[in-house]
Amino acid sequence: MWRFGGKQPGEVWDEPVDGPLGDIEAAERIRKICRSAADSAGQVAHLAASKKSSAQRKQQAESDRYERAAKMAMEIAMKMSDELMRDAAVREIVDLCLTANNTKTAKILFRAIHAPAIRDMVLRDHPELER
C-alpha cells in the first residue's frame, strides 16, 4: 500500500529484466506495456485540445509516460527474432500510438509489419494508415 508511506509501484516498462527474453516472453511484455500505457495514450489524445495550464501539465506527464512505454516496447520488439511474433507485437504498439493520436509513429511502425494477415487486420481496424 504505497499510499500509506510505502513505495509507489513502478511502471511495467521500468521493471528489470533478469536476462535475455525469448520471443514469447518479449511479446507478453510488450502486450503488458501497451495495455498499461493505454490510459495515458488516451489522456494524451483527449487533453491535446485543452488550453488550460493544469490540463497541459497533466497532458505533458501523460505524454511522457506514453512515450517511455512506447519506446521500451519498440526496443523489445526490435530484438525479437520470430518475424510473425514481432509483427504481432508491433501491431500492439501501432494500436497504442493511434490511441495517443500519434499517427506519424503509427505509420512508420505499420510499414515494419511484413505479415499480410497482420497488415490486413491493422488496416481493417485503422484504415487511415493506408494513406
Image (spheres, rainbow, N blue to C red):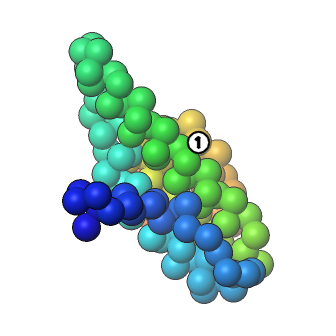
Q: Is residue 79 among the parts visible in the rendering?
A: yes
Residue 50 image point, x, y percent: 26, 20
Q: Is residue 2 above or below residue 55?
A: below
| Residue depicted at x 29% and y 15% | 53
Q: Nearer the viewer, residue 116 or 110?
A: 110
Give the side of residue 115 with respect to residue 118, left or right: right
- Which corner quadrant of the image does residue 81 belong to? bottom right
The residue identified by callout 1 is 105
* Crowd band around label 1 with a 10 angstrom C-alpha radius: few (<14), some (14–19), many (20+): some
| Residue depicted at x 69% and y 85% | 22
Residue 83 image point, x, y percent: 71, 76
Q: Amino acid at mark 1?
A: Thr
Q: Nearer the viewer, residue 74 or 98?
A: 74
Residue 16 image point, x, y percent: 62, 70
Q: Is residue 48 above or below residue 107?
A: above
User: Which part of the image, by quadrant, shows the N terminus?
Assistant: bottom left
| Residue depicted at x 42% and y 30% | 60
Label 1 sits on a secondary structure element that is helix
Residue 131 image point, x, y percent: 54, 39
- Which corner quadrant of the image does residue 25 belong to? bottom right
Give the side of residue 79 with respect to residue 67, left or right: right
| Residue depicted at x 27% and y 34% | 46
Give the side of residue 77 with respect to residue 50, left or right: right
Q: Is residue 91 among the parts visible in the rendering?
A: no
The residue furthest front is 5
